[in-house]
Amino acid sequence: MRRPLLHFLIIGTGLFMISGWLSEERAARPDHVSQDTIVISDAMIARLADEWITRFGSAPTALEQKAMVDAEINDEILHREALRLDLHRVDPVVETRLTQNMRFLTADEGAEAANDEKLLQEALALDMAATDIVVRRRLIQQMQWMLEAAAVPPSLQESRDYVREHPDRFATSPRFEISYRFERYSENPERPAPIHSAGFSAKRLAQSFGSSGAEQITSLVPGEWTGPIRRKDGFYRVRLDGTIPAQPIEFELVRARAHHALMLDRRQAALHRALRQLRLFYPIRVGGEPEDTTASIRDGDWRLDSAEVAESRHARAVLR
């Protein structure tokens, strides 16, 4: 009798508990792991830099370029791991994509209509799961979700502690009480422009007076005027009347948000831990220089194999 929940727990534990379960003899690189080096060529680095410039309008810094290269390596590792686990054989989205590809390729050949299973097998034989961009992105995403699943949901007390440790994320926004008046180009002293008063959050202040105008206003001493500050409808002089500091919010009002934020942090941490371990299984070469990933794998072969994934009904359900 199958027990899907038990299978899922076993898979989750085996995938993420990096421990000394296995003997020192099994700590060496497993035979079934691909020895193909992950290569990030100079041309690929240049392409990534060009994409950055197109998106942000300036060349990436050395730190930003390293982050781009690391992301490219991580994607390649996740893709290879997904293929190793045969996720492309159990994901209905991938199956549909590959089948549609084959229908498109054979549409003009005048061949008899083939069933989906046959088309899928033909696509797999052509190695489309490794070369199709859409399938690659899907498999990377699925592998990320599997690795992030190691994160343990926080308890109520842990959520409380998280709110206390991040007061700036769980508090009311500071408010700025200001007075402002329209600045006429030739103002009549006998009929000065009326003064309006209102309270603004930092976000609304920036929306109303622009980021530079908001910075001018918030740096004022209460009672001090500044300007003219340009808005869409003209120029204004503004006086800061006072500031209401940010206030902590009652925990029950942010309980769900805190739980979600902490869980997101834990999922990201679980993914990063897993990727650090997975890098030990793959030789990596960046721009002609090999990365130092030759350290022995002292934690044993903790990764799932395809049989374990296929055994889990829950894993199949998640992939759908």
Image: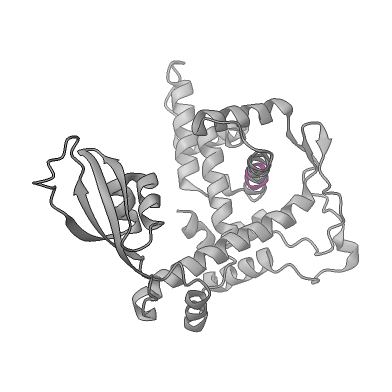
> In the drawing, does residue 233 fall left or right of residue 306?
left
Please state, as top left, top right, bottom left or bottom right, where the N terminus lies in the image. Answer: bottom right
> In the drawing, does residue 267 fall left or right of residue 216?
right
Asked whether residue 191 is in view, the answer is: yes
Q: Nearer the viewer, residue 222 or 252?
A: 222
Q: Quadrant of residue 176?
A: bottom left
Asked whether residue 304 is in view, the answer is: no
Q: Residue shown at 58%/49% (left/top)? A: 87
Q: Relative to 245, is 39 above or below? A: above
Looking at the image, the residue that sits furthest to the front is 190
- Colouring: one colour
Q: Nearer the viewer, residue 195 or 317?
A: 195
Question: What range of the chain is rendered magenta?
Answer: 75-79
Query: Residue 172, percent across and down?
Result: 35, 69
Looking at the image, the residue that sits furthest to the bottom is 157
Query: Residue 161, percent across and down?
Result: 52, 79
> In the drawing, does residue 53 fall left or right of residue 295?
left
Q: Is residue 2 magenta?
A: no
Q: Residue shown at 48%/59% (left/top)? A: 318
Q: Quadrant of residue 50?
A: top right
Q: Nearer the viewer, residue 272 or 251?
A: 251
Query: Residue 160, percent across and down?
Result: 47, 80
Query: Residue 138, percent across and down?
Result: 51, 44
Q: Magenta segment, principal secondary structure? A: helix
Q: Residue shown at 63%/70% (left/top)? A: 10
Q: Residue shown at 62%/32% (left/top)? A: 127
> In the drawing, does residue 133 fall left or right of residue 107?
right
